[in-house]
Image (cartoon, rainbow, N blue to C red):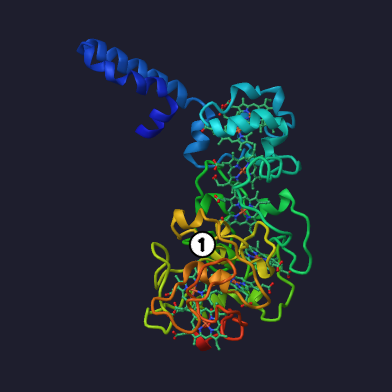
Amino acid sequence: MNVNSIVRHHPEVYAAKPCLGLLSAKGFIIVMLILLAALWSDSLWARDISQASGNIILDASHGNGEAWGKRNCSSCHIIQKIHKNVPKIKAIVDVKGYSTCTGCHGSNGLKTERQCLICHNAKDLPLKPVRGGKHRHDFNAKKDLLTTSGQCVVCHEASDMNGVFDLNIDLTVFNDAIVGLQPYANKSEFCLRCHNVNHQQKKWPITSQSSRNQILRAEDHFRKTDAHGGVDGDANGFYNGFRTGSYAYKTIVDCSDCHTSHGTQNSNLIIENVLQGAPLLSAEFRNKAYKVTLAGDDYSDLCVLCHQMQTISDGGDLPTRNGLSGVHFSEGRNCITCHSHGEEAQKGL
Ligand code: HEC
Ligand code: HEC
Ligand code: HEC
Ligand code: HEC
Ligand code: HEC
Ligand code: HEC
Ligand code: HEC
Ligand code: HEC
């Protein structure tokens, strides 16, 4: 247990610290012994074991095996007495009750469906995640299905819900036929464990053949052809330049910088608001919540969030629909004829 967690678990101890100087050496040792005893008893709590592994999902060792497969959490855990170290979680669980338990701790060996939307809805946690219109990543490109907790669990199998997004805890680590359970280095690697031609996840096969086949070919396109994936830019282009304090040449742009899984009015799951993507832009800029609307295949609202040409030419001074400026053809044009996934000419996408 590190110092931070001591402070976090024992605010009363931290507050007492300045008084230590007034104590004798003997008094100091006694205080330390009391502190150690407190820590020791704390470490007998199961929560430390689960936290240390970053895993709050129950397994067969739950309650020494006695509690595994039991349905009624209430028969052994009193809601008011748990979660003292996680006030944000305590607040919401106290209100929503026992139907939330499986959301964070798993199904405890039963078939019970895990609940996410009971908390992750527009009313209770409106920014976690930021939602939008009816198109969402529901694993069916042809239909707009209703959001279910089951969809969330596919991508977030064992989130620790600590308010910090950790790639390899908060996203499901899919076992891949080529790289196995290798941790993700970025968010795109997560998407590419499914969006590829020959090593897809068997449980979530990709059947649709979109016109550009990007749904299937994303891996090859993104890694080998796209300017935002594997191919590095050089800042010597006609329209080069980025918005200050944001992206730079050779930054890998993740799929989720442009696409959202959590709902948007835009086709192709393109973000409808800067708050849904482009996380490397400055907080000040993002907080202005610029909208992204598409007009046919005119994607300028999206591109202009990050790109801002230094030397103005070809309409770069004209405002896009969201009021920003700095991309060429911003008076409105079909961008896709020259910029789409896998397109090598004109530097593609
Ligand atoms: C038969 C009694 C019993 C039932 C029913 C029960 N538990 Fe437990 N649970 C225990 C015991 C005993 C422990 C270990 C002591 C402790 O930390 O409280 C425990 C520990 C836990 C822990 C901490 C585990 C860890 O590894 O850190 C969680 C989380 C938990 N239970 C959740 C649940 C949930 C959710 C349910 C309902 C699906 C449930 N329990 C039902 C007895 C029970
Ligand atoms: C939003 C996620 C979330 C939900 C929902 C949730 N828990 Fe927890 N639970 C946690 C986290 C995180 C911890 C670890 C806390 C810590 O480190 O002290 C935890 C710890 C526990 C523990 C270990 C002892 C303790 O006091 O912290 C028990 C027991 C437990 N939960 C039971 C439950 C039960 C029963 C429910 C349903 C009423 C529930 N949890 C719902 C996230 C959740
Ligand atoms: C196709 C996979 C996928 C699905 C389905 C999905 N998510 Fe996500 N989620 C992600 C990715 C990738 C991120 C990180 C990038 C981002 O924030 O968009 C994320 C981020 C999040 C965050 C953190 C947001 C933040 O700003 O810190 C929360 C909370 C979340 N998802 C909850 C959910 C819930 C609830 C559902 C079900 C309604 C869900 N997700 C469905 C992939 C998914
Ligand atoms: C009891 C309410 C509750 C339930 C049920 C719940 N969550 Fe959360 N979740 C939270 C809270 C609270 C946070 C932390 C928000 C914050 O502090 O920013 C969170 C955070 C997250 C995050 C962001 C990453 C992180 O570590 O903070 C993801 C992803 C997430 N939850 C997914 C899910 C999924 C998937 C389910 C269902 C399997 C689920 N949640 C069920 C309350 C809940
Ligand atoms: C678990 C596998 C899996 C993961 C992980 C995954 N996808 Fe998908 N994705 C699918 C499936 C399956 C479809 C539906 C294909 C179909 O209908 O044939 C799909 C569809 C899509 C679509 C088209 C959706 C529509 O409704 O038009 C987009 C865009 C997409 N995914 C992007 C992403 C992005 C971006 C990520 C990472 C944040 C991601 N996917 C992660 C399996 C996955
Ligand atoms: C989230 C920020 C972001 C968004 C949104 C974005 N880009 Fe980019 N773009 C970048 C970054 C960063 C690079 C540099 C990548 C590199 O060097 O590999 C880049 C590079 C490029 C390049 C190659 C430039 C060169 O000199 O090689 C083109 C072309 C491009 N983007 C077009 C677009 C278009 C078209 C859109 C809208 C559909 C768009 N971008 C949206 C961040 C973004
Ligand atoms: C006729 C083809 C064509 C069309 C249509 C087109 N572009 Fe471009 N775009 C280019 C060329 C060529 C470049 C410069 C590549 C270079 O610098 O080598 C470029 C570069 C870019 C860049 C990268 C700037 C940088 O950092 O280097 C952005 C952003 C961009 N275009 C946005 C758009 C947007 C938004 C649209 C639609 C409104 C659009 N383009 C339509 C041909 C096109
Ligand atoms: C710079 C922004 C940007 C990034 C980064 C990006 N995309 Fe796209 N994506 C777009 C745009 C714009 C379109 C629409 C034009 C096209 O089809 O090429 C699109 C289209 C798609 C489609 C087609 C959806 C459909 O329904 O036909 C899929 C699937 C997709 N992207 C997946 C991905 C995946 C997976 C990644 C990461 C490996 C990714 N994208 C990275 C901007 C982006």
* Place of residue 209 in the rendered image (x, y in percent of width and height, measured from the top left): 72, 77
Q: Is residue 107 left or right of residue 31?
A: right
Q: Nearer the viewer, residue 171 or 71?
A: 171
Can residue 64 be seen here? The reply is no
Q: Which residue does the numbered mark 1 point to in the structure image?
A: 278
Q: Is mark 1 within 8 Å of ligand 6?
A: yes
* Place of residue 245 in the rendered image (x, y in percent of width and height, measured from the top left): 39, 62
Q: Residue at x 49, y 58 (%)?
A: 279
The residue sitting at the bottom extreme is 345
Looking at the rendered structure, the kind of residue marked 1 is Ala
Quarter of the rendering occupied by the N terminus: top left
Q: Nearer the viewer, residue 141 or 300?
A: 300
* Place of residue 55 in the rendered image (x, y in percent of width and height, measured from the top left): 54, 42
Q: Quadrant of residue 221?
A: bottom right
Q: Residue at x 59, y 30 (%)?
A: 90
Query: With respect to residue 88, does 281 lie above or below?
Result: below
Q: Residue at x 50, y 81 (%)?
A: 315
Q: Quadrant of residue 310?
A: bottom left
Q: Is residue 67 left or right of residue 250?
A: right
The secondary structure type at the circle numbered 1 is loop
Query: With respect to residue 128, does 269 lie above or below?
Result: below
* Place of residue 120 in the rendered image (x, y in percent of width and height, measured from the top left): 66, 44
Q: Quadrant of residue 333?
A: bottom right
Query: With respect to residue 121, does 69 lie above or below?
Result: above
The mark tally for this picture is: 1
Query: With respect to residue 183, does 79 lie above or below?
Result: above
The residue sitting at the left extreme is 25
Can residue 306 be seen here? The reply is yes
Q: Is residue 283 left or right of residue 259?
A: left
Within-10-Å neighbours for mark 1: few <14, some 14–19, many 20+: many
